[in-house]
Image (cartoon, rainbow, N blue to C red):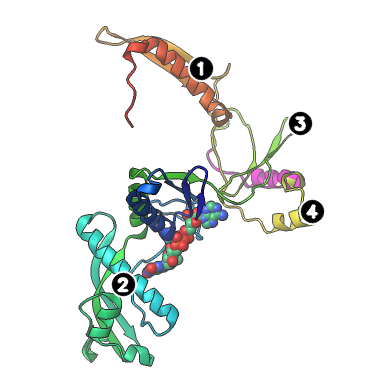
Amino acid sequence: MARNSNSSTVVVIGAGIIGLTIALKLQDLLSSKSAVNCSRVLLVAREWPTTIPHASSITLNYASMWAGAHVRPIPGTTAQLRREAAWLKRTVQEFSRQLKAQPWTGISKTTGIEFIEAPNCDYEKQTSESFAAESGLPGYRELVSSEKPAGTWLGYEYETYCVNAPMYCANLLRTFVLRGGQTVLTSLDVTTKTVTKQAKDGSWSFIIPRGFDGGTIIGGTKEPENWDSEPSLHTREHLLTAGQGLLLYACEASKNHDDALSSWRNKRVIADVVGRRPTRQGGMRIEPEERLLSNGNKKNVIHAYGAGGRGFEISWGVAAEVAEMAKELLGNDNLVLSKL
Ligand SMILES: Cc1cc2nc3c(=O)[nH]c(=O)nc-3n(C[C@H](O)[C@H](O)[C@H](O)COP(=O)(O)OP(=O)(O)OC[C@H]3O[C@@H](n4cnc5c(N)ncnc54)[C@H](O)[C@@H]3O)c2cc1C
């Protein structure tokens, strides 16, 4: 977290449970202090909450998307564990408040059951009173033999909370944004270069770093009228061989060829991608057309298709041209500005 004294912006780096919760607490703090009323909180992260995480879209480094996540107190037997116990107790109070005020955010109240085959003396000393005092969780009860699996020495239950971690994080983020918080999707990592080669036989090869841990694209083919949707092993080998030839040029200057080759050998093919470029002979069509409807009315359509292999790099230019055409068709008086 950093405070930029010039622009009065507090920056929180990381949109996991820790960064999100801190960002909300800072918003509370800043809104309650009139002297720093103008401060804003900016959340910067590489990965962001998604309600249904999938291994292909969320890395295993983004812990908050994969967490269980239950509240399970641990006896406060060391100074560090006592600090953590105090944090847990405060979290329990907050979960209880949030569950009542906003039951849809992803917190559930449930029963926690623990079985310990060989408990240490800290667990053995635990009582209903000490457990409640330390955790704030009620309902502690030691289980009798018939309620425990064979071989279990200590068993107990208590009232606790489970959190749907992705859903809860997504709700924290939504709250943050609705309160005026700002977000920046970025990686603090350095990426490599994008390299393209056009061979004299008409073939292409390129290495494109896909930032934010998205891997590296090794491409590519341009095959008009080939409608096959299956990847070809032969093409993969051809592309990898051509890509290896470009490797040295894609690396940062500080890397030597041996380093580059060694990281190439350790590469992992994430996926073979077959995609179609929406190409139109003669180039992209951007033009208005007046259409006669079956009821006799006329409506205007603005075409914007056929971007081929350039859609991203020309997108804002295309959009500006389409907006100009729309402005003309609608007439300035008819333009309605969105409130979103
Ligand atoms: C399987 C599993 C089960 C778990 N069960 C529980 C449980 O029951 N109860 C519990 O309390 N905890 C549980 N945890 C632990 C919990 O998930 C973590 O303690 C918690 O998610 C850590 O949160 P965090 O915000 O510190 O980190 P993360 O959730 O990892 O978030 C890190 C954030 O920092 C960003 N970031 C990192 N590096 C960069 C960079 N270079 N540039 C830009 N942004 C960057 C990331 O994109 C992300 O937004 C579990 C974890 C796992 C994996």
Separation of marks 4 and 3 at Cα, in angstroms: 30 Å
* Tag count: 4
Q: Are marks 2 and 4 in contact (CB under 8 Å)?
A: no
Residue 201 marker: 3
**Label 2, on which residue?**
89
The amino acid at mark 1 is Arg
Q: Position of residue 282 (x, y in %)?
A: 58, 16
Separation of marks 2 and 4 at Cα, in angstroms: 52 Å
Which of the 4 quarters of the picture holds residue 302? Answer: top left
Residue 268 visible in the snapshot: yes
**Label 1, on which residue?**
285
Separation of marks 2 and 3 at Cα, in angstroms: 69 Å
Q: Position of residue 160 (x, y in %)?
A: 26, 71
Q: Are marks 4 and 1 in contact (CB under 8 Å)?
A: no
Q: Earlier in the sequence, mark 1 or mark 3?
A: 3
**Residue shown at 62%/31% (left/top)?**
223
Q: Nearer the viewer, mark 2 or mark 3?
A: 2
Question: Relative to the observer, which residue lies in front, 328 or 125?
Answer: 125
Residue 256 marker: 4
Position of 16 with respect to 229 (left or right) is left
The amino acid at mark 4 is Asn
Q: Position of residue 52 (x, y in %)?
A: 38, 53
- In reply to whether residue 244 is colored magenta, the answer given is yes
The amino acid at mark 3 is Asp
Position of 146 with respect to 166 (left or right) is left
Q: Earlier in the sequence, mark 2 or mark 3?
A: 2
